[in-house]
Image (tube, helix red, strand yellow):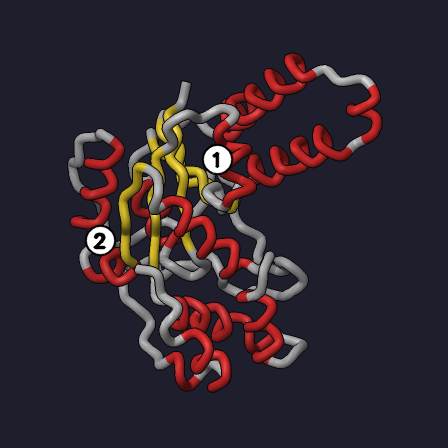
Amino acid sequence: MAKFFYVSSLPRTGQTLLASLLHQNSNICFTPQSHVLACLGGFSQFKTYNSIYNNFKTPVAFDRAVRAFRNKYYKEFTDAKYILERGPWATPYNRNILASFEKKPKFIIIYRPILEALASLIKVEKPNLDLPVLTRCQHLLSPGGAFHQGLLSIQGSLKEDHIIIHYKDIVSKPKDTVKRIYNYMGLDFKGIRTTNLDQYQVKGIKYNDVLLNGFPHQNLHTIRTAKIKARKYDYRDILPQSIIDQHWDSDIL
């Protein structure tokens, strides 16, 4: 049975690059945004609110099936022995779901300052954005938005067994950063390649960024393969001043 770790992060924090580096080891799978968590959330909603279930409750059978779902899914998804599950697993609601089958979860927090990460996403989206940048930022930062959910999960992860990985370290010292992750996972580190990288894929399946959450995201999950290099820009040139004023001191790490 595979060993699981849970990744808490904001969007645009170097996860795809880090996944490419980790995937050089065939025993490691860094997942896309979790399909499993979305499905388990649906199961939880069904059990709590659906009148068909509540009319004829089968808690033992239902809970066993839910616990088995993740392992069955990943048995088909990957042959890796170590799986890094990407998603907001440590929000209060999702943490209760996780507790049903993982008693002592281990979290990998990947962090980048909020305004930097937000500006990075807006920079990618802006050419195809069909609403004001301010409105998009507000959606992302509001309850239920990707940044709000990510921050909640990071805050929850800090209360658990965790390691913190900073975006700046992924791009400036990738070998040392990957070595830290290996140590946390209990693996021997034998080095990685930091040039001529592979684009992210799992068993030949790649991201389709043509349409995601209603917005065209060209190159959202495309990395520079020749060598690792941070894209330099100033978030003050990208984000509305009102967003900067509201969130300049919102970082939690």
**9 sits left or right of 213 in the view:** left
Q: Is residue 32 visible?
A: no
Q: Residue sitting at 41 percent across and 18 percent down?
A: 1
The secondary structure type at the circle numbered 1 is loop
Q: Residue sitting at 54 percent across and 25 percent down?
A: 76
Q: How far separated are the C-alphas under marks 2 and 1?
A: 24 Å
**Camera-side residue: 248 or 210?**
248
Position of residue 212 measured from the top left corner of the image (x, y, whole percent)? 62, 58
The secondary structure type at the circle numbered 2 is helix
> Crowding near pointer 2: few (<14 within 10 Å), some, many (20+)?
many
**Camera-side residue: 162 or 68?**
162
Position of residue 37 measured from the top left corner of the image (x, y, whole percent)? 56, 38
Q: Nearer the viewer, mark 2 or mark 1?
A: 2
Q: Earlier in the sequence, mark 2 or mark 1?
A: 2
Establish if 68 lies above or below 123.
above
**125 sits left or right of 154 in the view:** right
> Crowding near pointer 1: few (<14 within 10 Å), some, many (20+)?
few
**191 sits left or right of 77 in the view:** left
**Camera-side residue: 44 or 237?**
44
Circle 1 is placed at which residue position?
203
Q: Which mark is residue 144?
A: none
Disc 2 marks a residue whose amino acid type is Pro
Position of residue 101 measured from the top left corner of the image (x, y, whole percent)? 49, 24
Circle 2 is placed at which residue position?
174
Disc 1 marks a residue whose amino acid type is Lys
Establish if 240 lies above or below 23.
below
Tally of marks: 2
Establish if 141 lies above or below 243.
above
Establish if 59 lies above or below 91.
above
Q: Dividing the picture into quarters, in which one does residue 209 lie?
A: bottom right
Q: Are marks 2 and 1 in contact (CB under 8 Å)?
A: no
